[in-house]
Image: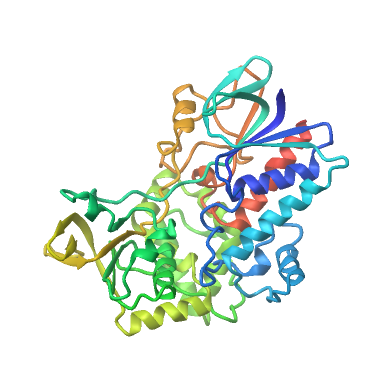
Amino acid sequence: MIYDVIVVGSGFSAIAVTCNLIERLPGSAAIAIVGDDPGFGRGTAYRTELYLHRLNVPAGRMSLYPGRPRDFVDWLESRNKRLQESDFASRSDYGLYLRDTLAGLLRKRAGRCRVDFIKAKATGCVERYSATFGFQLDNGDEIAGKNIVLCLGVGNASLPVEPSGIPAPGRSRIVRNPWRLSWLGRVASSDDVCILGSGLTMIDQVLALRAHGHIGRIDVLSRRGLAPLGHVKVPPSPSQTDVQTLPDRISEILRILRSKAREVEDWRAVMDGLRPVTQALWQRLAPDARSRFLRHALPWWNIHRHRVAPDVFERFETLVGDGTVRFRAGFLKSIEMGKGGVFVRYRVRGRPDIAEIRTDWLVNCTGMERAGIGHSPLLSEMMRTGLIAPDPLGLGIEVNDRSAVTPASQNSGGRLFAVGALTTGQFWEITAVPDIRVQAKAVAEEIVAAN
């Protein structure tokens, strides 16, 4: 059959698009969701069961629907989890909320469009002259659709340097994907752990280690030795910024923002004021200014913009303060096995010296890979056939301001959209729920209007 919409992916972007489509499409329409993740919609982030793994956005801003801001908070209350809108819920609860929201829509059979979940990976895509796109699946099947929404996220980043000369037993001490939490059960309480990367994933894994009874030393190695900052329990009122009055140069923009931060009671007021206009600011930057931002300012943006729940931050700061967690700034040179464990060698930042960390475990917390095409066989094939084009800075694929993929199809008449991380090059701030839900709603409305 030919579907009205095919949603490719199984993370948050896919569930947000699917829920919006179900609410808007007529009963005669049909949707196919293609993905091989059994926890549809929860993804890596919302599948964790550890209570210390919290959302980094207050519950009042995590509704699946931008027009119903209390939806998630009301869901929590209905399950006797009475959080305030300013509280930070667990990621596990958020994953259950997504599951329940979708299930509630699917239970309403009367007048609802058809929804087929296809547990498979799409491996190829071709334009058809019947105003559709056809997909080949890894189970041997083929499907076709008039509207395609690519909701493919990104995976865990690879190790910056591949280990050399490490036998099989030693390789088991190198954790390439920390979200496969089975490794935690193999860590002895007094083992030394070295974590590569100092972002939000690092904090999650440090707290997971402590929750599993680990009392050993934890070394954190990253290029700059920076760590995410925390939210405050009573956030300041946002300090508004008119992005249209900002200069074009990144250095001048940073100078103005730093000056504003000194004028307010708490620098978070400036960051929170930028929150609603970050996409507009990004879109007015010239390509060379965007490139300079990625090279020089991104680490500082990340630690100020992507903050940690207050109580989680306090727990982490205690571990830093008592010396359990030690930060090292430098550039990884090699990973080798020797007598006594894994040896991590790095060049100390700002100096030519080579330093060494001996550890029992090496954990890759360098974050998620930058949104791109190379991680996906499907996207690579679609680029080869000219259906998509890479963003010039490697930030996903080219889309227009309505999330329609460019270059647009000239043959089939079918329509191709992307939602979430793949559209980072156009929107920049498009990896968090408050942004993706707006985009998902807009794409669903665009599809329904032309259906």
**Relative height, residue 136 to residue 224 (above, below):** above
The residue at 88%/42% (across/down) is 110
Residue 78 visible: yes
Quarter of the figure with the N terminus: top right
Residue lying furthest top in this view? 129
The residue at 34%/79% (across/down) is 320
Quarter of the figure with the C terminus: top right
The residue at 67%/44% (across/down) is 17
172 on left or right of 110: left
- Quarter location, residue 380: top left
Residue 241 visible: no
| Residue 5 x %, y % | 69, 32
Residue lying furthest right in this view? 110
| Residue 389 x %, y % | 48, 31
**Could you tell me how many numbered marks the image carries?**
0
Report the colour scheme: rainbow
| Residue 2 x %, y % | 71, 23
**Relative height, residue 415 to residue 433 (above, below):** above
- Quarter location, residue 190: bottom left
The residue at 44%/73% (across/down) is 229
346 on left or right of 268: left
**Between residues 246 and 309, which one lies in front from this camera angle?**
309
| Residue 32 x %, y % | 68, 34
**Between residues 184 and 27, which one lies in front from this camera angle?**
184
